[in-house]
Amino acid sequence: MIEIEGLTKRYGEKVAVNNLTFTVRPGLVTGFLGPNGAGKSTTMRMILGLDRPTTGDVRIDGTRYDRLEDPLTYIGALLDAKAVHGGRSAYHHLLCLAQSNGIPASRVGEVLDTVGLKAVARRKAKNFSLGMGQRLGIAGALLGDPRILMFDEPVNGLDPEGIHWIRTLMQTLAAEGRTVFVSSHLMSEMAVTAEHLVVIGQGRLLADTSMADFIRRNSRSYVRVRTPQREQLLDALRTEGITPAGADDGALEVDGVRPEHLGELAARHGIVLHELSPRQASLEEAFMRLTAESVEYHAHTGPASSPPSGQWGAGWRKGS
Amino acid sequence: MTVVQVVRSEWTKIRSVASTVWTLSLAVVVTVALGMLISALTDREFGRLGPADRLSFDPTLISFAGMSLGQLAMIVFGVLVVSNEYSTGMIRTSLAAVPRRGTFLLGKIAPATALALLVSLATAFAAFFLGQAMLDEHGTSIGEPGVLRAVIGGGLYMTLIAVFSMGVAAMLRFPMLSLGTLMPFFFLISGVLGNVPATEKVGRFLPDQAGRRIMQVVPPAGDDTPYGPWGGLGIMALWVLAALVGGYVLLRRRDA
């Protein structure tokens, strides 16, 4: 279990992490989602005691990281696959980590086998591909057979086979009852791996919810209707007790009603429809909508004046 | 987490990178070979020395002449042991494994110092005996008063140079910055300060100049150095201690 309490990290004027409070629980994969620069890596570095929080507190199974006896046996982490001396072999890299935490040397061979690097154990790490480096980092995280595992953007730059392998590994680890905390800036990635979701933007907590709940609330389906007789359709809907939302282009978006029903309703009132289409807002849209205000670097395509929510949130309104 | 575990881990780190072998071999080869060369040249030119020079002729010190260049390899060894962690990013992995930073630094410095001591003592003895062989009848022997102290002292001097470099590298973190500070300091600044009359009195309290005193058996004519051989080594040790404390304080305070 990782408990984060009021965690804040300030670099001069800039607040990288702003009063974060959440708990990462055992037995499931918790996704840590946020746009690039949201403070995910900074938070993870503070969890490992690498960066000192400005205020706030992190506990690993109730203890401060630097008070843990042999921390690698409590929490294993892959923060940066490049945090390796390239001139050292995979075997010696893992051996020095094992020795520092009193882990038997025999464990090095085991984890190299688990991540599929046994054949290249004596090769220097600088000759490794990105995927191999990632596997070496994961081997280091698994070394102490820890109850908690933490991965920062583990699938970044991996080929599909590697991505599949990491996803399966994380689910296996969680199924064994371990705490798995994994960050990503991709909602789609989280949707397939995580059961719980912590979303941050500009260092602030935006959501702390189960994935099922997040999908239920955010990935809603609706029907998009366009008509030249807008007022009449609104009246007709109102008599049915339906309150639609208006889209930017004058179309209406109706929640919780099947398109057949809407078409029949319009026909009964003699209303002409130019469009009647069932829509589904993607999770990615939901996530972008959630973090829109907190994204640090917007890519402004099109007119500079158009607000980001207009581009990203088109066709999506917060569920009632 | 015990210091013993960390020492074992750091020893694995030291022996599993190529830079350890080439820096230390270079230190041995350069110190011994240059010492032999200068000893041989001195032997040939001995007849031309004036009576005053003959009086203060110090065959032990002559055989250590290669150390001024060989110590640069020791500096590189000391710098790389520490700053490799930063240049490669390994420091984050290391500090996650050993979060107590004092334990980490101690566990890193201790085995590196032990190795440097072993190599330095071997170098000092090799440089002495081979240098004396080159000096032939102008040489001295290990049994003469003060000679054994000078040879062991030469080994300690080289070791302290390496440890000082480790402390400076712990403060400055990055190899190019550390080497770019230490190399000119020992190769230029210290020499200049020590040879210009106005700054000579300050210059001789610098770590290398104070430490080198222990390798002298025959003091130069008109020597007014305010400290003896062990006093000089003590001054150097204080510099080393200051560098290590500085490295520790910064390591503790800084984010990795």
Image: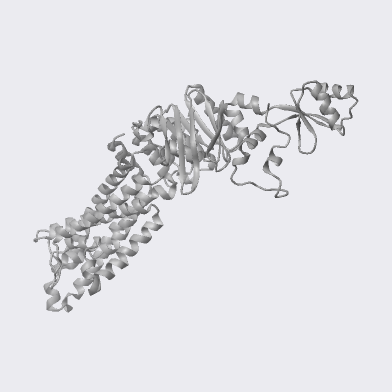
Reply above or below: A27 against B213. above
Q: Foreground residue, A4 or B243?
A: A4
| Snapshot quadrant of residue A190 | top right
Q: Is residue A142 left or right of residue A189?
A: left
Number of labels in the image equals 0
Q: Residue at the right extreme?
A: A270
Q: Position of residue B143 (x, y in %)?
A: 9, 58
| Snapshot quadrant of residue B110 | top left
Residue found 87% across the figure and 30% down from its top: A273
Q: Position of residue A142 (x, y in %)?
A: 44, 31
Q: Foreground residue, A301 or A82?
A: A301
Reply above or below: B156 against A225. below
* The C terminus of chain B lies in quadrant: top left
Q: Position of residue B91 (x, y in %)?
A: 40, 44
* The N terminus of chain B lies in quadrant: top left
Q: Is residue B207 left or right of residue A238?
A: left
Q: Foreground residue, A120 or A107?
A: A107
Q: Foreground residue, A229 or B79?
A: A229
Q: Position of residue A258 (x, y in %)?
A: 78, 22
Reply above or below: A2 against B119. above
Q: Can the viewer see residue A136 in this picture?
A: no
| Snapshot quadrant of residue A264 | top right
